[in-house]
Amino acid sequence: MIQPDPIACQIADLFSKRNIKKKYPVTVRSDNPAFKRSGNSFDFKNIREYQVNDDLKKIDWKLYGRTERYYIKEFFEEETLPIYIAVDRSASMNLFASKSSMQRFIVSICYMLLKLNFTITILSFDTNIKATLKNLKGVEKLAEISKFIEKISFEGKTDILKSLKNIIMEFRPSILLVFSDFFDSPTSINKINLFKKLFFFHFFTPINTIFNTFGDYEVEDEEIKKIILVPFDNMAADELNKKQSMFLEALSEKGKKSLNKHYFRFTSETIDENLKEVYWHFLELLYG
Amino acid sequence: MADFFILLTILIVPIVILLYIRQTKRKKVSFSFLFFRDYEKRRFRQILIKFFQLFYDVIFDIIIALLIAILLSGIFGNFMQSRKNAVVFDGSYSMTNNTQDGVTVLEKGIQYYFANKDKFGKHDIFLVAFDIHKVKTRLFKINSIKEMQNPAVIYKYLTSKYFFYEYSYEYLKKSKLKNYNKVFLITDFFPYRVTDENKIIPVEIGQSLEDFFYPAGIIDDLLSQKSTIYFIKSPSINNPEVEIYDKNKKFIKIDEGIDIQNLSNNFFTISTQHKSLLKVKSRLKTFYINLASDPVGLSASGAYSQILFELLNQGLDLTKQKKALLERGFFFKEDQVPFILLVDDLSREELSDIVKNYNDIGYISNRYKQKFTRDSVIPEDILKNNPQIKDIDKNPKIILLTLFIDNFNIKSEQNDTLNADNLSITENKILAIMDPSLTAGYIIPTIDISKILAKQFSKTSIYNSLLYEKKFLTNEYFYPLFFPITFLKSPTTIIFYSMMIRELLSESINLNEKSPIQACSFNQLAENENDILSFDFNYIKAFETNKKYIKLENNIFEKVKPLEINKTSLLYQYGDKFIGINIDIDEFIHYKKDSIFSFSKTENTGLIWLAALMLVYLLKIISYIIFEFKKKKNKV
């Protein structure tokens, strides 16, 4: 089982002890159609006549006194905000060298959210949604999550755009965290802009980690199982670096543009550094 | 060739090593193609990689290596062989003829070789002979005969193994012999262009006593539907047999319809209306003449103009040449010599020498001798009448023209005393100018014909040759006649031509489109193989310098099969067509000297290319080495 980062635990604890009013609204939200289940909150929903199978406790006796008929008062269910977590499971994720750190990071984030009483739905995608783990609530569900993450085998092609569209169509998430390397076609990278309320966690593998010296390289793309030869020299290095910076700009700039969109980038070397700030920053952003 | 392969191997080794290093050091990584899509799209590179599994620049390297190897092998080959001499035995048919001593010319040559073996220095031995299967001249290396001693045995060995027929001198010039320091050609052939006297070791090998006869030309008379074949022969040759190729695909001897006329001891003609393949056979020689071909086929070619050139330039012992020329059907009566040579690019002294020698063999009258020799004065009337002569007087290096003078008519009805001596060159008397660069072949390098045409000879009838450009064809008296170069280079055919002219003049026939003499131009040759085949082989030979026709010729000869093989002729069949290859009349000249012929050195523009390529090649390797050293330091 993947253990969450102890720092994440501490930060989650700290956050849970903050002034409850300042918390992100965890009470019932009547305007939101996603929360229209009947429940035990104080938010009034409806009054209806007593049915046979209803609980006797729920009968409104005051109304009975006035009308001599049995009525039942319904309230909205008290529910926390559901958060959706999408994990990229395409083959290109294998490029990220410290995979265990990556997994631990995801688990840590999940832990923090569970700790802060969020409902989590975790799903994996490549060209489309592959596996889902719905409506997890409470820290005890962490084991399930870590099992889910452990089980993910990185293979197949990526289609981030399609996957995200489908996730939004299906779940209508108010908050979506995307864990991916974003190695997809440039067009889909540019179109990610369309989505709002997203958190991007970018597990990035820079080119220079692979091409460290000049020479000939046989580059294989595991997603499409093709090999090309790249004579890597100064010119090629310039060209590739240019492309890489353009790619990163496309992602991060769009993250900045929208208030609801946030972008975190990790490389295999930096993933273990400054995690404290990252967690804190993430939670701050989450709570607005 | 071996040099080339060795060099190529040496040059390719570093490339292969570099490749090996690159191949082994190539790293296999996996990464998303997000940044490499351009590499994937580079299709040309991809194709190359697919085919060669290498980088495109390797091919570039190999091409450079190939070029360097080609250039180097040429240069090294020259360098290596230039220290050697070559002894080349003439493999022509005439070498197998008996000499006065009872042995063949070739045996004499072999004897001569063994007697002078040491004098040749370090050398290779070659035989230049005819390859019957490839229908072309080939150079055979016969170093093995160095070990043998008996000339008769060697003779037997050589004649049994190789086909003694004829060879192309042009081929010899272009062959690998040019790489040798000196080339000794042991031949019965007249010495070619003996330019450097220091190298010459002239030794007479002997003289053949064989009789000869050979075709000189054909005239088709369209009116009488008759073709007349002119033959030149030695006096003792009797009338030959004539066979005709009939429908049964056999040669059949015929007498009807064949008219054989002895014009003189040296000349006879065969006239016939049969338009078919003729086989003219005598005791000694057989010739195939295809009258089915259209238009006129002229079978004769030869090196007489070469002989004339040598005579004129060398001033050698002329009596033998004269005898030889007489033997070959040259007539030395003054009124039968239709041309005068005025040579440009020669000094007055040289000119006078030429005229002197020329006169010795009866080519030129004293009158013309006077014009050009120092000790005599050019007659005033000539100077007055002909501004051309004035120019000659002012500038000795001026003109070369071949003039046909109307009084040379052999059948002169007026009187026999009329000869060139009585002539004065005036504008009106000049009837024809032949393009000197063709008729005299080597003698005339260039001439500004347009000047002469425009001024001096405005009323002259000009029989033009092929090399005239159309811009000169403005003169109303201009009658273009087209002949193959080989035809016009040959004095025998010049004789033939002069006969034609004579006939024309005596019968006052104007040359026009309806002329009975057909003009044939090889411009008219279609590129169709069959059209080519309708011409005589000699016509094809005329295109030797033209690559296109060489290719065509090769195509033709790849498909032919030898039908009949005689000592002096070969008959090939190609579909329904026949190609008869008769021994070139070059082979009938028997000047028994071995000679060295030198080749002009080829300009070494190749060296510059070589240097450039070497530089590229070196840079490539050096840059790679530097790159390898720096590689470790260079991190992106």
Image (cartoon, rainbow, N blue to C red):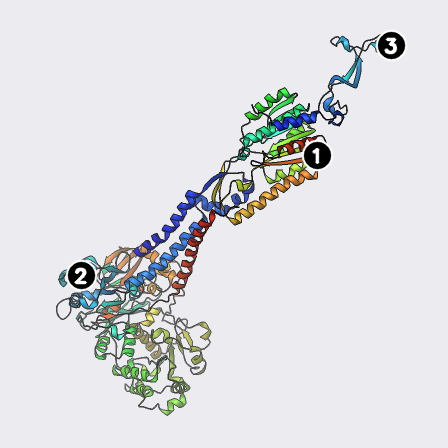
Query: B467 or A268, which lies in front?
Result: A268
Give the class, few, some or many, for how many residues have Cα within 10 Å of label 3's Cα (few <14, many ≥20): few
Q: Are marks 1 and 2 in contact (CB under 8 Å)?
A: no
Q: Which of marks 1 and 2 is in front?
A: 1
- Residue density around tag 1, few if under 14, some if 14–19, many if 20 or more, within 10 Å: some
Could you classify mark 2 by the number of other residues whose Cα lies within 10 Å: few (under 14), some (14-19), or many (20 or more)? few
Horizontal side, residue A176 vs residue B182: left or right? right
Front-lying residue, B339 or B280: B339
Whether residue A164 appears in this view of the structure is: no
Q: Residue furthest right?
A: A66
Q: Work out how far the residue at label 3 is from the one at label 1, CA to CA, in angstroms.
A: 50 Å
Question: Which of the marked residues, 3 or 1, is nearer the chain's N terminus?
Answer: 3
Relative to B106, A40 lies left or right:
right
Q: Do the residues labelled 3 and 1 touch (CB within 8 Å)?
A: no
Secondary structure under badge 2?
A: helix
Name the spot of residue B593 as percent of width and height, x first. 21, 71
Query: Is A125 in front, or is B287?
Result: A125
Q: Is mark 3 on a helix, strand or loop?
A: helix
Label 2 or label 3, whichever lies nearer to me, is 3
- Give residue B146's mark: 2
- Residue B447, how many percent across, how many down? 40, 77
Type of amino acid under label 2: Lys
> Which chain hosts label 1?
A
The residue positioned 44% from the left and 52% from the top of the image is: B626
Locate residue A254, reporting x and y percent. 67, 39
For mark 3, name the chain: A
Question: In the image, which disc is placed on residue A66?
Answer: 3
Q: State the separation of the CA atoms marked 2 and 3.
A: 145 Å
Quarter where residue B504 is shown: bottom left
Task: Give the numbered dot on residue A260.
Answer: 1
Q: What residue type is labelled 1?
A: Asn
- The image quadrant that residue B356 belongs to is bottom left
